[in-house]
Amino acid sequence: MPRRKADPALPFRPFAEDAGVQTFAGFSIENGTRRIALHGSLDLTRDRAGLKRAKALKSLLDAVVATLEAEDLPDAVPEEPETAEPVRNPFA
């Protein structure tokens, strides 16, 4: 399933869907219904731009924490085996 960037005008809704990605510079937060994955790196510089990125990241993580706190959670989410789909070799 192709990943799409979250619309910055819309709030990030943790665990709401399996296709959204929120990006801050080189740092991506991939939304999922069972887990949220964090990838890349993000520099929080000591300037206004760094403060803006830090606040955006904090807001996003506050939403994740609030969503988790509002649910009756299991001790752990079972690991999902990776499912590989065969792909036809275009050179064969």
Image (cartoon, rainbow, N blue to C red):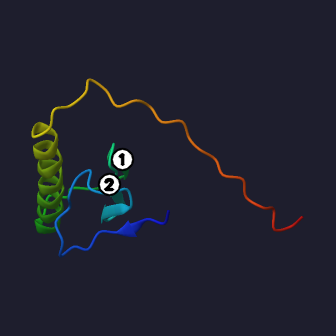
Q: Position of residue 83 (x, y in %)?
A: 59, 44
**What secondary structure is marked by label 2?**
loop
Please indicate whether residue 44 sits to the left or right of residue 23 in the image. Answer: left
How many C-alpha atoms fall within 10 Å of the one at disc 2: few (<14), some, or many (≥20)?
many
Tag of residue 31: 2
Question: What amino acid type is highlighted by mark number 1?
Answer: Ala
Position above or below: 40 against 34: below
Per the image, the residue denoted by label 1 is: 37
Which residue is located at x 18 percent, y 71 percent? 10
- Front-most of residues 52 and 56: 56
Position above or below: 36 against 24: above
Q: Position of residue 90 (x, y in %)?
A: 81, 68
- Front-most of residues 25 and 68: 68
Cα distance between the residues tagged 2 and 1: 7 Å
- Of the 4 image quadrants, the one containing the C terminus is bottom right
Which comes before the other along the chain, label 2 or label 1?
A: 2
